[in-house]
Image (cartoon, grey):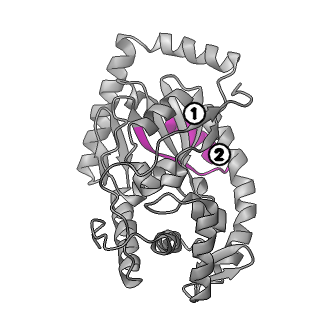
């Protein structure tokens, strides 16, 4: 399916395409979630609610309690109910580990990504993180992050910081619905200024999920003790010693990844592992489902369809 095909631009198609994306992940949606993640066009909650009623009336969508799925997939609402316990269990752990990542030297942003960010984790799911580091310290940060992974494992917590960037590489190269979801549903736990820059440099994502623009997020600042520790450790490794360590670690790990055929992108500014095949599968599967439903979607390759605005508030602090 080509996103350029645009004989009509219908809200009903956008609603069904939104449900089609969630259906790939066996995820039932509420009306407010369909509005939030509406594909390719801006609409008000009332307009989305009206389109949903029409789709339910025509038998394309089905409603069970507050959850909406395609007809024949109504049992997914029970999965949402059971996931509530997983979310309550995993989010405190995710925030606690995120606070540890945040105080590591040269870490400029910590964000929860993946299934937990979408509130769609399996009971045994890893907690995925995006880490953004200072230039010249990506592989140094990754080595420290591996230590946190091992520490968490000893506590019975499975975490996976599987996407690391430096502030030199905030322009994400893949412009597709999967990457837009990963970016816009990410929950930043620290680094509000870098998060705003990341969003501003990837405004293309607003074309895929325009109702996500304008959201308000709460990002706690570092407390005094945490900021002091971070500052001292950055002074210790901010000069030639840190540069040599980062260069040695990058050369060693990149060579190893390439030797064993590890999938991903690896450079001095990017360490992105194990995304390509899953992303490609999701994008192909979404297009296949939209084709099967004969949906005519708006183009998402031109100008933005809604103005960009994200508000950051602060609450508490990371000590």
Asked if the residue at tag 1 contacts the one at tag 2, i.e. Cβ–Cβ closer than 8 Å, the answer is no
Split into 4 quadrants, where in the image is the C terminus? Answer: top right
Q: Earlier in the sequence, mark 2 or mark 1?
A: 2
Q: What percent of the width, then of the height, locates residue 312?
A: 61, 33
* In this rendering, position of residue 280 left or right of residue 13: left
Residue at image position (31%, 70%) is 6
Q: What percent of the width, then of the height, locates residue 311?
A: 59, 36
Residue at image position (30%, 52%) is 302
- Badge 1 density bin: few <14, some 14–19, many ≥20, Cα 10 Å: many
Q: Does 290 appear above or below 298? A: below
* Part of the protein shown in magenta: 143-164
Split into 4 quadrants, where in the image is the N terminus? Answer: bottom left
Q: Does 103 appear above or below 158? A: above
When asked about the image quadrant of residue 217, the answer is: top right
**Residue nearer the viewer, 317 or 195:** 195
- Regarding residue 101, the answer to whether it shows in the image is yes
Name the residue that disc number 1 marks: 101
Q: Return the mark for residue 319.
A: none
* Numbered disc total: 2
Q: Does 310 appear above or below 297? A: above
Q: Is residue 43 magenta?
A: no
Task: Assign a secondary structure to mark 1.
Answer: helix
Cα–Cα span, label 2 and label 1? 10 Å
Q: What percent of the width, then of the height, locates residue 279?
A: 37, 61
Name the residue that disc number 2 marks: 94
- Regarding residue 121, the answer to whether it shows in the image is no
Q: What percent of the width, then of the height, locates residue 151?
A: 61, 40
Residue at image position (46%, 43%) is 307
**Residue nearer the viewer, 191 or 207:** 207
Task: Assign a secondary structure to mark 2.
Answer: helix
**Residue nearer the viewer, 287 or 87:** 287
């Amino acid at each position: 399916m080509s996103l350029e095909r645009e004989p009509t631009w219908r809200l009903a198609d956008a609603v069904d395409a939104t449900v089609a994306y969630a259906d790939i992940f066996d995820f039932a949606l509420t009306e407010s979630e369909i509005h939030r993640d509406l594909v390719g066009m801006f609409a008000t909650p009332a307009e989305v609610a009206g389109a949903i009623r029409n789709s339910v009336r025509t038998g394309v969508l089905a409603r069970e309690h507050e959850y909406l799925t395609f007809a024949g997939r109504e049992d997914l609402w029970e999965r949402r109910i059971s996931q509530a316990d997983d979310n309550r269990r995993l989010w405190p752990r995710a925030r606690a580990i995120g606070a540890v990542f945040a105080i590591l030297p040269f870490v400029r942003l910590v964000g929860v990504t993946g299934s937990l960010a979408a509130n769609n984790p399996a009971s045994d799911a890893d907690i995925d993180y995006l880490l953004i580091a200072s230039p010249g310290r990506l592989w140094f940060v990754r080595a420290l992050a591996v230590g946190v992974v091992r520490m968490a494992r000893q506590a019975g917590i499975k975490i996976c910081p599987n996407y690391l960037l430096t502030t030199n590489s905030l322009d994400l190269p893949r412009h597709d619905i999967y990457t837009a979801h990963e970016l816009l549903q990410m929950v930043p736990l620290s680094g509000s200024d870098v998060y705003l820059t990341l969003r501003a440099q990837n405004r293309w994502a607003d074309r895929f999920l325009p109702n996500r623009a304008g959201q308000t997020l709460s990002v706690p600042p570092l407390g005094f003790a945490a900021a002091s520790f971070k500052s001292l450790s950055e002074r210790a490794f901010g000069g030639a010693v840190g540069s040599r360590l980062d260069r040695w670690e990058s050369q060693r790990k990149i060579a190893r990844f390439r030797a064993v055929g590890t999938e991903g992108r690896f450079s001095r500014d990017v360490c992105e592992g194990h995304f390509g095949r899953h992303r490609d599968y999701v994008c192909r599967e979404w297009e296949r489902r939209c084709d099967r439903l004969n949906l005519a979607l708006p183009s998402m390759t031109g100008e933005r369809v809604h103005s960009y605005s994200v508000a950051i508030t602060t609450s508490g602090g990371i000590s």
